[in-house]
Image (cartoon, rainbow, N blue to C red):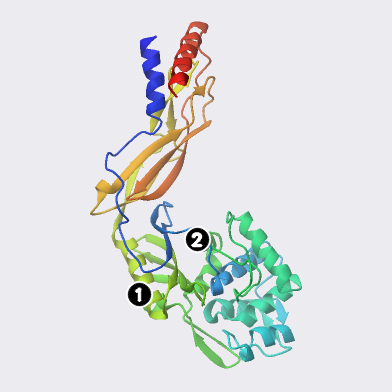
Amino acid sequence: MKSRLSSALAWVFGLLLFLCTAQAQAQLFETRAKAAFMVDAETGSILFSKDPDMLIPPASLAKLMTMEVVFDAIKAGRYTLDDTFAVSENAWRTGGASSGGSTMFAALKSEIRLEDLIQGVIVQSANDGCIIIAEGMAGSEENFAALMTERARQIGLPKSVFKNSTGLPADGQFVTVRELVQLGMHIWKTYPEFYRYYSQRDFTWNKITQRNRNPLLSMDIGADGMKTGYTEESGYAIVGSVSRDGKRVFAALSGMTSERERAEEARKLLDWGMRAFQKSELFADGEVVVEAGVYGGAKSGVALKAKGPISILVPITNRDRLIARVAYEGPIIAPVEEGTPIGTLKVWVGDTLSQETPLYAAESVALGPLHRRALDAVGELLVGWLR
């Protein structure tokens, strides 16, 4: 009885298993951006986080979602790069040269190949190109924006809401830097044949050549995407990606006060993300992470493991800022079938929750004999009083 009660008490006070004893400390990096988020593309480790879920107007960063809808339609076979779209008077007036915004100078009533429109939107941030696509695919910008929001939910972006294809100011149109990074990574992983457009340095249309507006591309840091944006309400923003020495990171920043500050803050954060971390394998494939207590089972505990190895990027010079815990809801009641999801391994770097990995039962635990279940019941009753 004493050992079973001790085990139950250990469950109450030990739901969180410390793999490292260091206490979480301050953020490892500082930025002038009001909101920022950075992730390692391979492991999914969160390398930096500052107000990542703050709702912000997307500005031209909405065009990442516009392109995701386009790429998805092409991949599904509904459109090809050679399909053409008509330039309506609405697209010409709202997004063309007379609008004063970003434009590819599409000629009124002309027909433009989808691939050229894609390059106009990505390289030149063309508002007219976005509207032409939206009208061609959905009949109107309103319909297309609804598709954008619906598609955002499908790919796991619960907060982003779009009201137009351009990102021009509109009530109720919001994104977060966390979801912008998720969107950028999704585009890179899902559409490698189209991601290359984001590193294209310039594009010529209607005899007018414009350079890519992403300042990171001209810096020698391995940048190959993605997009910039600006609104008076939230300032200057950017989504960027850097690939170097077999590593890739994605970052989104918002709330800078100038183009110069945006370029410098993005460069510093991305470069720090590439230099300040190294990959570390916490658990090999099939390795047991922890044993969780089982109530009423043939065994008193069940081993937990992940589906595959668990790797994370850790600070090179501040490894003591890594802390890991296992969390699960209990008591776990027998019988337990192998492969049942049980808990989560959570790893912090400093005060940033960097990675969460689901853990599963590594074995089956049958229902225990009557006397063992009785002892567990008494132990649980006593522990319940203590709670």
How many neighbours does mark 1 have within 10 angstroms: few (below 14), some (14-19), or many (20 or more)?
A: some
Confirm whether residue 309 shows in the render: no
Q: In the rendered view, tell whether residue 349 sits above or below residue 169.
A: above
| Residue in view at x 65 percent, y 74 percent | 81
Task: Please provide percent x and percent y for residue 38.
Answer: 41, 60
Which residue is outermost to the right? 139
Q: In the rendered view, tell whether residue 42 sits above or below residue 231.
A: above
Q: Is residue 214 left or right of residue 139?
A: left
Task: Please provide percent x and percent y for residue 373.
Answer: 50, 11
Circle 2 residue: 54
Q: Amino acid at mark 1?
A: Glu
Which quadrant holds residue 345? top left
- Residue 264 bears which disc, if any? 1
| Residue in view at x 59 percent, y 73 percent | 167
Task: Tell me whether circle 2 and circle 1 mark residues in contact (CB < 8 Å).
Answer: no
The local secondary structure at tag 2 comes to loop
Give the mark, 2 or 1, whose residue is nearer the N terminus.
Answer: 2
Confirm whether residue 241 shows in the render: yes
| Residue in view at x 41 percent, y 25 percent | 11
Q: Is residue 318 left or right of residue 161?
A: left
Q: Closer to the observer: label 2 or label 1? A: 2
Q: Amino acid at mark 2?
A: Met
Task: Please provide percent x and percent y for residue 375.
Answer: 46, 10
The local secondary structure at tag 1 comes to helix
Front position in the image: 338 or 4: 4
How many neighbours does mark 2 have within 10 angstroms: few (below 14), some (14-19), or many (20 or more)?
A: some
Task: Please provide percent x and percent y for residue 251.
Answer: 43, 64
Which residue is outermost to the top? 371
